[in-house]
Image: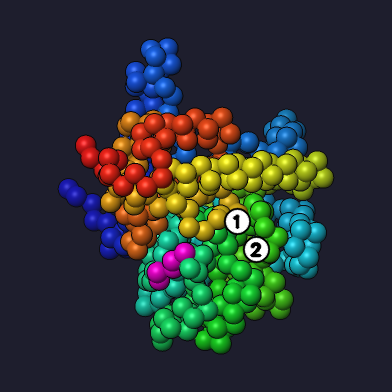
Amino acid sequence: MTLRTTTRLERIEPFFVMELAKEAGRIARSAECDPARGGEPMVFLNIGEPDFGAPDAALQAAAQAIAGRALPYTDATGLAPLRERIAGWYRTRFGLDIDPARILVTAGASGALQLACLALFQAGDEVLLPDPSYPCNRHFVAAADATARLLLAGPGQRFQLSAEDVVRHWTPVTRGVLLASPSNPTGTSIAPEVMGRIVQEVRRRGGVTLVDEIYLGLSYDSRFGQSALAHDPAGTDVISINSFSKYFSMTGWRLGWLVLPPALVAPMERLAQNLYICPSTLAQRAALACFEPEALAQCEQRRGELQRRRDFIVPALERLGLAVPVLPDGAFYAWADCSAHSPSSWQFCERMTRRAHVALTPGRDFGPAAAERYLRLSFASSMDELRTAVARLQREIGGRGSGDNRASGP
């Protein structure tokens, strides 16, 4: 007997890059990548995960929590002291006065996006997103039975939506926009004045602006490192999604948060109670320590290290003929054009995995517009690994503008 699945699943595309990641893992375990057998280890620049791990203070706090009393359920909205510390971070880092009651701690940013989409979107609704954008974001929309409408966003607008896009493409069924600033995969942010105009145009149409800000702490340019919440001081129609995964390097702890308009807190709390009861108590107790001065200082040091890596890798890619049209001002990704070497980013990345033993991410998952032209490189790995990767890529593809398509062959 074949079990029936819902038509909803037909709108959720596979995460294609994971197939290439599995192949990279297979090769990494083979003799050709075994140093004991004369092989060269795989360099993984395909996964967006900082190599630092949680701040020392968070690890110590987790150990103390485990050694202490039992870890009971918390409120579905999260520990009150944690919500207060998050609000304090917005005040000191961004100059925003956020009521802790507007903050809902979630099971990762993915949990936050799921709650937001289920609460706000339904069948027949349409949500505007840029192409390129993180694939799971459009799938959260689809999982709520709404339609994610991808709009081409090229380098001239920093691979981000503009207010003009909103005006041009808004229809009677459009419910809002889902943005990311800084963005995965491009590492580019929406300029504050552009964000302000987007919020204004969405508001005029009675919509909602959702902004994925999980990389906001990893901004390298103060002009861009501002929250979209600054454009909604009354807490009317802007929702910010954030996480402990990136700036605080706590990926596997699965802890995020939402900043909501007051009217949405109770409905979202009701959803959270039923979907996952509460976020991890252990992760929350560890996260409390993230806002201690020594932990924040450590995170700032790491942000500086990531900027140093960016300043190394982007010019290196340019010299290899892998143009980065817009300098990433945040996150830890470079969105590079590989068309000088191959007509297919998938084939290029596959070849680099097999030949250079450097795992990269082709553009296919991030939207159809530039799927064949662009690849994503994560510079969250160490400088030694980045230097090794550049040397191997140089070995395989040569310098700028080789144009011989060697990387697309068998």
- At a point 36% along the width and 59% down the height, the residue shown is 370
Q: Nearer the viewer, residue 359 or 83?
A: 359
Q: Which residue is mark 1?
A: 329
Residues packed near mark 2 inside 10 Å, few (<14), some (14 to 19) or many (20 plus): some
Viewed as shown, does residue 197 lie left or right of 13? Answer: right
Q: Quadrant of the C terminus?
A: top left
Q: Which residue is mark 2?
A: 224
Examine the rendered structure and indicate whether residue 206 appears above or below residue 154: below
Q: Residue at x 73, y 46 (%)?
A: 300
Rendered position, 30 above or below 182: above
Q: In the structure shown, which secondary structural element does the residue marked by tag 2 occupy?
A: loop
Q: Name the amino acid type tagged 1.
A: Asp
Label 2 with label 1: CB-CB less than 8 Å:
yes
Inspect the image, locate mark 2, and give the three-letter code of the amino acid beneath it: Phe
Q: Is residue 225 visible?
A: yes
| Image spot of residue 312 (x, y percent) | 58, 41
